[in-house]
Image (tube, helix red, strand yellow):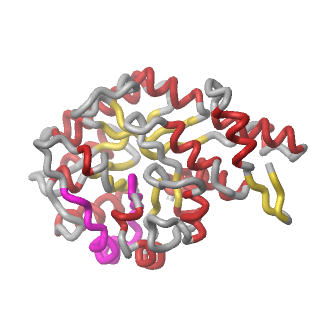
Amino acid sequence: MSRGGDRQTIDRRSFVKASLIPATLPLAAVLARSTARAGEQAPAGGTVPEIIDTNVHLFQWPFRKLKYDQTTLLVAKLRKHRIAQAWAGSYEAVLHKQLDLVNCRLADECRTRGAGLLVPFGSVNPAAPDWQEDLRRCHEQYRMAGLRLYPTYHGYTLDHPEFVSLLAAAQKRGLVVQIVMRLEDERVHHPAINVPLVNVAPLVDALKKASEAKVQLINSAGPLLGNNVADLVRQTQVTFDIAATEGNGGVGRLIEGKNYSYRGAIPAERLLFGSHAPYFPCESALLKLFESPLTREQLQSLMNANARRLLSQ
């Protein structure tokens, strides 16, 4: 750890030496060891703040085998790195049409194999008939905390009238709405799949009609946001995850407005930890978090406080 006035940061070189060389060590534990070596006061309770991962999926990705596509293996991997809670969608929701069956299976999997770690996020397609019933069941029957939407795979845009209605319905029920900006790089799409990019520009106007809706963009790489970052931050309460943030120190530069792939700054209080596991290794997001020159307060916000606040609003 290093100090600059009252600023506490994680030293990237020390982190690499402490965690990447002995690669079997859980990455989140580095903060505790670095704190002890530097003689700093440990976080409250003497332990490292645990992490809430807002972006994981269960079951099989349709287009290739993933190492941790079995729930028990994924949960064990997340726990190894002090991830205490993970918001889970289902890969089956991407291409299946009967979303209620997908949501039912997801809720059951999280309950029976989630080991108290997984929080199910169901999927609803506002372009499909009777989506209101799917939403009702997600909330009332499956007790889900939120929804995970796949606009490009489900064939609608963010100015679709029913999407705006969905935001209002979710707002009324207090559900978090996650909008998946992308699941994989367009260059590696299966040739049978034609998935356009999400145009996020209409979201600002959509949220004027549901201003209290709790919306998070996940896998929102800079090129997907284009010139909309400033408007989203200034005119809405949208939050983002860090799974698609690229470059050494990318999270820190994103907060400062200096990330090369974003046209704008995203404050630390609007960023949530997300790994996009198991498609991405969860260690990738941990590296993005710990290699940036973040203060202790910013780290704790990204690791868990922002996610807890979003759920509790």
Q: 204 and 111: which one is in front?
A: 204
Q: Is residue 313 visible?
A: yes
Q: Is residue 312 visible?
A: no
Q: 137 and 62: which one is in front?
A: 62
Residue 163 spot, x, y in % from top left? 22, 63
Residue 199 spot, x, y in % from top left? 26, 67
Q: 230 and 245: which one is in front?
A: 245
Give the residue at x 87% y 44%.
38
Q: Is residue 219 magenta?
A: yes
Q: Going by the image, does 12 lie left or right of 38?
A: left
Give the residue at x 65% y 37%.
28
Give the residue at x 57% y 36%.
83
Q: In the displayed orientation, state which residue is furthest to the right.
A: 39
From the viewer's perspective, is residue 19 above or below residue 159?
Answer: above
Q: Going by the image, does 290 lie left or right of 153?
A: right
Residue 73 spot, x, y in % from top left? 44, 21
Instruction: Give the mark count.
Output: 0
The stretch of residues the image draws in magenta is 196-220
From the viewer's perspective, is residue 24 above or below residue 305?
Answer: above
Give the residue at x 42% y 37%.
277
Q: Quadrant of residue 207?
A: bottom left
Q: Going by the image, does 36 lie left or right of 139?
A: right
Residue 300 spot, x, y in % from top left? 66, 51
